[in-house]
Image (cartoon, rainbow, N blue to C red):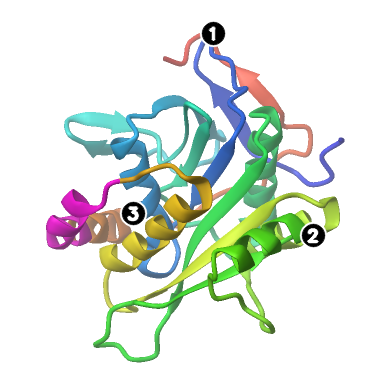
Amino acid sequence: MKQQFGTYDLVLRSGVDPTTGGVAICGFTTAGMIGVIATSHIIESLNLTQLGTVMDENFPAVALIQNEIPRHPVRVYQGDGIGVFTAEIQFEKEQDIAFGSTVLEWFRAGGFDQLIIIDGILKPEKQIQGEGLFAVGANSTARDRLNSLNLQTIQRGIVSGITGFLLSEGDRLNLDVTALLSEASPMYPDVRAAAVAIEAITEMTGKEIPLSKMLENARSIEQSVQEIIESATPLLPSPNDDDDVINDPSFG
């Protein structure tokens, strides 16, 4: 299917096959940093392999360094029947559709059957951490799954940003897309709220993702992600309409 919106370049490591199949999971730099925290934990826990990155010549020139390793801020990973798309940089609202379209391009290239978006919603009580989890399914398959697991679904409301675009496109294209929206603290990166979303993913996929280490180190993780927030530059360009998946022999 021809891409109707502009996208950013999905640059794969040399010689890799993007076909993964199974479940695709993505997380962004939004409320409580829920998506970034959750995807980072999934990548580490399941020992996923980096497949490539999302790049554009006008992206901020930045490397995020963790455990002595410098990385691009927007990356894709793959494992056995699972793929992860993580964005440790904040996008301006004007780039939401282009970024969401890039996620769908990765979803199609990977041959995935199901897309799960991890996002956060802010609680009004500043002193209380997130505990609740809400879900939205884009098509009947996704909604039936949520109901069978007794996950609390949103009956009426608005989901904005990249997550909202992906849900709407899932409805339009009849894709199995689910958004998990975990209530998060507006004051700091909320590791515990991310753990709630990960528990739901385990229920939805049957993939066991251990949480004990994550919860034990919650305070240090929250501090680490807070430093990323403070140093990130929320500046991204508009994409070119003819961008496509690129295999770059110099990458990796």
Q: Nearer the viewer, residue 239 or 219?
A: 219
Q: Quadrant location of the C terminus?
A: top left
Q: Which region is colored magenta? A: 210-222
Question: Horizontal and vertical percent for residue 106?
Answer: 64, 35
Q: Secondary structure at mark 1?
A: loop
Q: Nearer the viewer, residue 160 or 238?
A: 160
Query: Where 69 sits versus 219, above or below?
Result: above
| Magenta span includes 214 | yes
Q: Residue drawn at (59%, 34%), measured in percent from left and top?
A: 22
| Residue sitting farthest toward the front | 148
Q: Residue drawn at (54%, 34%), measured in percent from left and top?
A: 55
Q: Quadrant location of the N terminus?
A: top right
Query: Where 137 sits versus 71, above or below?
Result: below
Q: Nearer the viewer, residue 108 or 245?
A: 108
Left or right: 130, with 1 as reference point? left
Q: Which residue is mark 2?
A: 171
Q: Which residue is mark 1?
A: 15
Compute the Cα span from label 1 to label 2.
Answer: 34 Å
